[in-house]
Image (cartoon, grey):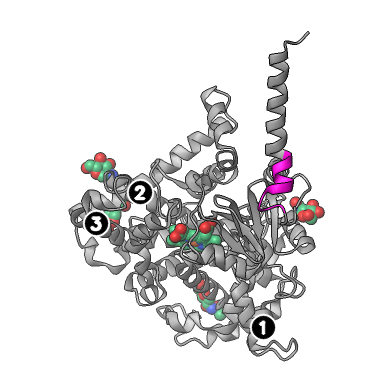
Amino acid sequence: MMPIGVLALIIAVAGVVLYQYIIYPVLFSQMRHIPNAHWSAPFSRLWILHIRFTRQENKILLDAHRRLGPLIRVGPNELSINDIDGVRTVYQGGFDKPAWYSVFDNYDVPCMFSVRTAAEHSARKRLISNVYSKSYIQSSASASAQGRAILFEKLLPLVEESTAVTQEPHGIDIYSVFMAATMDFITAYIFGLRNGTDFLCSKGYRDHFLELYKARNDYGIFDQEMPLLTKLCRKLGIPLCPKWVDAANKELGKWCLQLCDATTNTSRADQDFSGDPADQPVVWSALTAGLQKEQKVQGPASVLYPTALSNFDLSVASELFDHVLAGQETAGIVLSYLSWRLSQASDLQAELRAELLGLTPNMYMGSKSEQPSLPDPKQLGSLPLLHAVVMETLRLHAPIPGAQPRQTPDEGCQIGPYSIPGSVRIAALAYTLHRDETVFPKPDKWDHTRWLPSISAGEVSGEEIRQRHRQFWAFSSGGRMCVGSNFAMHEMKLITAAIYSNYTSHIVDDVGVMNQSDGYTGRPEHERLFLRFERVV
Ligand code: HEM
Ligand SMILES: *[C@@H]1O[C@H](CO)[C@@H](O)[C@H](O)[C@H]1NC(C)=O
Ligand SMILES: *[C@@H]1O[C@H](CO)[C@@H](O)[C@H](O)[C@H]1NC(C)=O
Ligand SMILES: *[C@@H]1O[C@H](CO)[C@@H](O)[C@H](O)[C@H]1NC(C)=O
Ligand SMILES: CC(=O)N[C@H]1CO[C@H](CO)[C@@H](O)[C@@H]1O
């Protein structure tokens, strides 16, 4: 016989559970009228966690949005949004980031990308946004000198060398080369050319780095999605991630501290960084100068205090580590998909080359004696065909295709006909926005003409193109959109122009290798792409 008290307790607990998890979500929650992506979504996170961990989230949410409309419930306290007005409410509205982004704190110090509140974010962004603006990059003598050195002394010689390869597989793993080029570009701009990396010329270290980097990419999801459980398991000594992940993260952290140290040491010895524009650490200088000023003027009154100001060196390193990682892989992925697409379209390559040769000066290196030149950045930036092929690649192969979570403000918000309570996780994703059939007909097709203003065949009107730009979300939108988008666009166009002014490319081996992974970031699953390059004669 069970004592009556225990029975009552059991009934009471069952009642509370029933109310909390069944009755309230179905009958009373403000979100009960929002379509459910899965029947279990109002009661449990199991479904969304399952598709997230098995890497099918983007695909399944696309299907759900097509069936159920632009706002869907994916968990008890989690929504997905897929129309541009809703996106504006959330992302232009400056909603805070949830703790999900804390895994992007480096050295336990937040950076611009990982801080949660809008106030802290803008205090950081103020320090560095100028050096990433389009006009700054386009007129920067440092960016130009660095680009020249990396392209003409490192990247093009590698491509040239590969044209002579005669054994199988013919050609070169261009994925690995692009990953190296984008790393050398971003670290040169941040730390100066000679204190940046030299991944292009050191394949051994580059491969080692890319191996380590998998730790960050593939295992952060435990801390992001199940922080309490993950912490508990770590305490109990049953880690959910393999041991090498922590070691890899440590090594990467140390690696970036060394880059920062080298620049700090150089600045102590030679304030002018040898006077060579290529050696100027543009981002490092802006960030350290900004933080020093903040320290003097504001001290403990600053919003950056105590995390950023009390630990100066780690704050600098945390911020720059994020730029290095955010800036490398993303642009490397786009360049790989772009060269893969071009390699399947020799006519398009010819058309693109014709456009590139119209640059004055252009990047054609007809005779060895001539000093190769960089094109005028403004001219390069406004070539319509080059722009179209880059945009279409960013659309179909967005390097960050997955959900970018935000949190509704305490007072809640209105999305379309629905009023949403506070502290709800809500996210849009480029993967689904970029496959909206009403804006991008035949969305699975790579078709650069979507971005060309004067296409007779497709009768693309100005309004349609404007709508496509509004729907374009590869760099996110609002106050927390990608701060490096201008840098990335410039760098990707420059690299593409340098190669395709002078070479044609051809597929060697791509059977399935360019399948793109599903998740927050999307990489070619096999992380390689062999192409054969031929000199244009
Ligand atoms: C094709 C290349 C790139 C793509 C597609 C891309 C995409 C994005 C996206 C989607 C976000 C927002 C993510 C979120 O809120 O969850 C973001 C943020 C960011 N990106 Fe990029 N990115 C690229 C290149 C770069 C480069 C070259 C840098 C170099 C500095 C960079 C630095 C950053 C930083 C610092 C943030 C955080 C901005 C903030 O919170 O204010 N990215 N990027
Ligand atoms: C850093 O760059 C300076 C030139 O600005 C160079 O003299 C120095 O050797 C570099 N340091 C390292 C560790 O590469
Ligand atoms: C920077 O200088 C310190 C102190 O002189 C030295 O211990 C350290 O190895 C240097 N770091 C780099 C990367 O040059
Ligand atoms: C690429 O994806 C397709 C479709 O999902 C699949 O059938 C194929 O097996 C994948 N190929 C490779 C090499 O992973
Ligand atoms: C047409 C042509 O072959 N142009 C040049 C491409 O670049 C190489 C050097 O990297 C030159 O040797 C070629 O003449």
Distance from the alpha carbon under mark 2 to that under mark 3: 17 Å
Residue 414 visible? The answer is yes
* Magenta span includes 29: yes
Q: Name the residue nearer the viewer: 257 or 65.
A: 65
Q: Amino acid at mark 2?
A: Ala
The stretch in magenta equals 22-32
Residue drawn at (67%, 52%) of the image: 525
Give whichever of discs 1 and 3 has the lower sequence position. 3
The reply, left or right, for residue 113 in relation to residue 283 is: right
Image height of 304 relative to 178, above or below: above
**Mark 2: which secondary structure?**
helix
Give whichever of discs 2 and 3 has the lower sequence position. 3
Estimate the x, y position of residue 520 in percent, counting from the top left. Answer: 61, 53
Label 2: few (<14), some or many (≥20) within 10 Å? many
Residue drawn at (55%, 77%) of the image: 502
Establish whether ligand 1 lies closer than 8 Å to the Cβ of label 3. Answer: no
Label 1: few (<14), some or many (≥20) within 10 Å? some
Residue 533 visible? The answer is no
Q: Which residue is mark 3?
A: 294
Residue drawn at (33%, 69%) of the image: 142
Estimate the x, y position of residue 517 in percent, counting from the top left. Answer: 67, 53
**Mark 1: which secondary structure?**
helix
**Mark 3: which secondary structure?**
helix
* Magenta span includes 425: no
Q: Which residue is mark 2?
A: 317
Estimate the x, y position of residue 6 in percent, counting from the top left. Answer: 69, 15
Give whichever of discs 1 and 2 has the lower sequence position. 2
Label 3: few (<14), some or many (≥20) within 10 Å? many
Q: Amino acid at mark 3?
A: Glu
Q: Which mark, by number, is residue 464?
A: 1
Q: Name the residue nearer the viewer: 174 or 451.
A: 451
